[in-house]
Image (tube, helix red, strand yellow):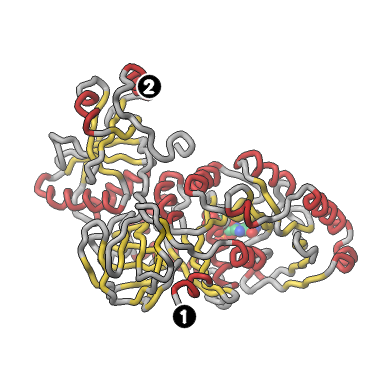
């Protein structure tokens, strides 16, 4: 019998994280090829991106800046599993978005460029993974091109990320002369053949050590020696340490030529944990077979100029989702119909009729939903609050044309609910001049672009004197507000942030007033 838990057992839900250009798009495309979702149509992911940009001003901004802002979810079958792949924004200014996407993922795949190793953005995203305690696999890409040595890359992972790299496959042939990989567990050698631009699956030939030695000569000898050494050193993939984020299984490959993609997908199926009962705010767990519940991890508006709609991305956490069921939002307590449920990948949408734990659904025009909300069929539940990142940039926003104040106010509220930018209000000024707070400057660009184009409310942003924020409470607020170089502003949920002109000044206030509440926020230091 099909039950939520039997369907959950077949699900693998993960996100790819990488520095821009490491090959995330190419790898996604190849996953689809191996999942049978693309047929011979490699290149479709990029083509889709082109189409998206043409139809939406949102994408226009992405294209101008050459960055990817929107997150997409993608589903395809592989072996006897259903794979849910979550896309993450590549730019560091959107690391808060990445954090939220990872809330919906059970694991991540970190893609490294063999010539570059760990790059700044890989490190930032890795730290997000660590913060969320998300186990991750590592794919060392572009082995078809000259790059660093395999052992050197392992050292880099170990030293920079302080995680033990445990190869599942080991490359035969140095980077730039990729012959194939040896599977560390079985000792089997898989030899690859190139296809024209990797438009079809790479033909693979499996052989044992003797046949490999004959076929590859010195390249095999060198690889076999290293492979043996790694095994002796105990560098062997291990589920327990992987799940504890103490080790990362490593795969070598070349997404462009399809080498190693199948091994990686097998790794995902074999090692990524299936959806488990989700922890609730009160510390209990919601069983997979209980009635439908889902977590809103991203709200995105203005994805399609023609529709001007707003989509809440939901990860199914328990039960069976059936399109049309009546759901309750935890924050508002309001019920709504889920008639317009879709799967979404960029601009391509398909109506979805049912979904199981681990699956991602997009609810169109579920206007009351905000990031972090739970939705349920039946009694309401709450998930642990998603922590807000410590903002580092603060700008005062004013509407340019006062006759557009209503639109401005609506736009600001919506951006806040989506988590596109944090909105802070002064008790005296309220919505007249809210302070927009961001982790990265690009968030302001997105906010002004959307306020102007989507809500018809052009805004003027002016720099504030503040550079750092901490959490505070009502008791400390009055004292802090009276100090020079300090201000206390409120979030929509009533929580309070204290802003300081400089870190130096903040440290002094903390030292002089130990009685005041001045708390650090998530992603302080490590990420910022
Ligand atoms: P991203 O999404 O992480 O930003 O990276 P993307 O897949 O767009 O790849 C960035 C560039 O690296 C692309 O080249 C892509 O073809 C190339 N690439 C990806 N995987 C491999 C690989 O395994 N080997 C080699 N040699 N190159 C790889 P481009 O010139 O920017 O684009 P295109 O003209 O090839 O489409």
Per the image, label 1 sits on a secondary structure element best described as: loop
- In the rendered image, which quarter is residue 161 located in? top right
Percent x, y of residue 355: 40, 73
Regarding residue 309, the answer to whether it shows in the image is no
Task: Give the residue displayed 33% in from the left and 46% down from the top.
Answer: 445
Q: Which quarter of the figure is the C terminus placed in?
A: top left
For marks 2 and 1, give the one nearer the viewer: 1
Percent x, y of residue 114: 66, 50
Return the residue at label 1. Answer: 2
Task: Give the residue displayed 49% in from the left and 64% down from the top.
Answer: 275
Q: Label 2: how many residues lie within 10 Å, few (<14), some (14-19) or many (20+)?
A: few
Return the residue at label 2. Answer: 507
Q: Residue furthest left?
A: 403
In the image, residue 493 sits, relative to residue 472, either above or below, namely below
Depth check: give the residue in front, 243 or 139.
243
In the image, residue 114 sits, relative to residue 205, either above or below, namely above
Q: Earlier in the sequence, mark 2 or mark 1?
A: 1
Q: Is residue 322 left or right of residue 426?
A: right
Percent x, y of residue 38: 53, 75
Q: Is residue 84 left or right of residue 348?
A: right
Q: Label 1: how many residues lie within 10 Å, few (<14), some (14-19) or many (20+)?
A: few
Percent x, y of residue 406: 12, 51
Query: Which of the labelled discs sits on residue 308, or is there none?
Result: none
In the image, residue 313 sits, relative to residue 164, either above or below, namely below
Quadrant where ligand 1 appears: bottom right
- In the rendered image, which quarter is residue 344 located in? bottom left
- Residues under labels 2 and 1: Cα distance? 58 Å
In the image, residue 407 sits, relative to residue 310, either above or below, namely above
């Amino acid at each position: 019998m099909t039950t939520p838990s039997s369907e959950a057992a077949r699900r693998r839900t993960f996100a790819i994280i990488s520095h821009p250009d490491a090959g995330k798009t190419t790898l996604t495309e190849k996953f689809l090829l191996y999942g049978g979702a693309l047929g011979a149509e490699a290149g479709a992911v990029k083509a889709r991106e082109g189409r998206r940009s043409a139809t939406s001003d949102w994408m226009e901004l992405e294209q101008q800046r050459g960055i990817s802002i929107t997150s997409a979810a993608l589903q395809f079958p592989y072996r006897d599993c259903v794979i849910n792949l979550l896309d993450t924004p590549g730019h560091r200014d959107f690391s808060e978005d990445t954090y939220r996407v990872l809330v919906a993922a059970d694991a991540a795949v970190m893609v490294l460029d063999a010539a570059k190793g760990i790059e700044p953005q890989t490190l930032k995203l890795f730290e997000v993974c660590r913060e969320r305690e998300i186990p991750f696999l590592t794919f060392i890409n572009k082995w078809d091109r000259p790059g660093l040595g395999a052992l050197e890359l392992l050292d880099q992972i170990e030293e920079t990320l302080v995680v033990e790299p445990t190869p599942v496959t080991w490359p035969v042939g140095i980077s730039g002369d990729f012959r194939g990989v040896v599977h560390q567990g079985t000792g089997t050698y898989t030899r690859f053949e190139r296809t024209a631009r990797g438009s079809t699956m790479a033909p693979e030939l499996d052989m044992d050590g003797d046949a490999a030695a004959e076929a590859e000569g010195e390249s095999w000898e060198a690889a076999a020696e290293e492979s043996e050494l790694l095994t002796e050193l105990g560098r062997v993939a291990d589920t327990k340490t992987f799940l504890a984020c103490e080790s990362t299984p490593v795969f070598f490959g070349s997404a462009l030529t399809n080498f190693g993609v199948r091994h990686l997908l097998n790794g995902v199926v074999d090692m990524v944990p299936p959806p488990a009962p989700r922890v609730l705010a009160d510390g209990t767990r919601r069983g997979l077979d209980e009635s439908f519940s889902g977590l809103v991890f991203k709200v995105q508006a203005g994805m399609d100029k023609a529709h001007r709609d707003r989509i809440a991305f939901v990860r199914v956490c328990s039960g069976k989702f059936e399109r049309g069921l009546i759901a309750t939002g935890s924050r508002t307590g309001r019920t709504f119909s889920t008639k317009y449920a879709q799967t979404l990948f960029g601009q391509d949408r398909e109506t979805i009729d049912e979904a199981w734990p681990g699956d991602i659904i997009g609810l169109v025009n579920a206007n009351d939903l905000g990031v972090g909300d739970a939705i349920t069929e039946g009694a309401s539940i709450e998930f642990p609050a998603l922590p807000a990142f410590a903002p580092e940039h603060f700008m005062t926003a004013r509407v340019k044309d006062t006759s557009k104040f209503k639109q401005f106010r609506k736009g600001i509220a919506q951006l806040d609910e989506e988590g596109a930018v944090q909105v802070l209000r002064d008790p005296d000024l309220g919505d007249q001049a809210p302070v927009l707070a961001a982790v990265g400057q690009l968030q302001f660009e997105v906010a002004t672009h959307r306020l102007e184009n989507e809500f018809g409310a052009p805004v003027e942003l002016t720099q504030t004197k503040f550079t750092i924020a901490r959490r505070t409470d009502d008791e400390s607020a009055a004292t802090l507000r009276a100090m020079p170089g300090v201000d206390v502003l409120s979030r929509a949920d009533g929580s309070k942030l204290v802003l300081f002109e400089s870190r130096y000044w903040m440290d002094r206030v903390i030292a002089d007033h130990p009685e005041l509440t001045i708390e650090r926020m998530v992603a302080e230091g490590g990420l910022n």
